[in-house]
Amino acid sequence: MNKGRMTMTPKQSKPKPSKSFDETRYEVLRDPQAAAIYLDKCLADGNMELFTESLRHVAKARVGGMAPLSDMTDLGRETLYRTLSKQGNPRLDTLNKVLTAVGLRLSITSDAVLVHREMEFLC
């Protein structure tokens, strides 16, 4: 008996490789509700570097990357790469254009409403 080793008989096929983390992340972030919760959580932590980088991930998942986002927002690709990097510091109007392009919007909400919304999404 072979303890601890996986052996394959000739008739067995190789196991399928699992999806990469990035593939899974982009698949999940295509859903607007998941993207909104993801960005909200990143923003709630108060870490703007995390938020701008996360917004870049949402943009890639929802519109395909910086080139289509540039076309949709009338902002240059270089500007978007810089703005949506860890060191980025987007202006409010830029943030609004990017969020609108990915199908989201800015909103001010009390903490109590956010907790209720997350519970609805998870159920």
Image (cartoon, grey):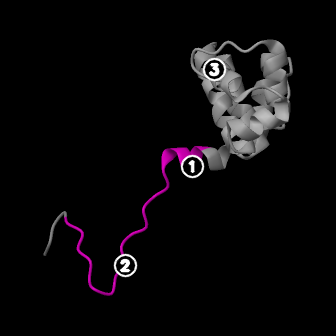
Q: Tell which of 79 and 13 is nearer to you.
A: 79
Disc 1 and disc 2: Cα gap in Å?
Answer: 24 Å
- In this view, 116 is above or below 9: above
Q: Is residue 98 magenta?
A: no
Q: Which mark is residue 24?
A: 1
Which residue sits at x=78%, y=18%?
111
Residue 104 visible in the displayed image: no
Residue corresponding to mark 3: 82
- Quarter location, residue 67: top right
Regarding mark 2 in the picture, which secondary structure is present there?
Answer: loop
The stretch of residues the image draws in magenta is: 5-25
The amino acid type of the residue labelled 1 equals Thr
> What amino acid type should be assigned to the residue bearing mark 2?
Ser
Query: In which quadrant is the N terminus drawn?
Result: bottom left
Percent x, y for residue 38? Answer: 67, 32
Q: In terms of secondary structure, what is the magenta stretch mainly?
A: loop
What is the x, y in percent for residue 78? Answer: 66, 25
- Closer to the eye: label 3 or 2: 3
- The residue that disc 2 covers is 13
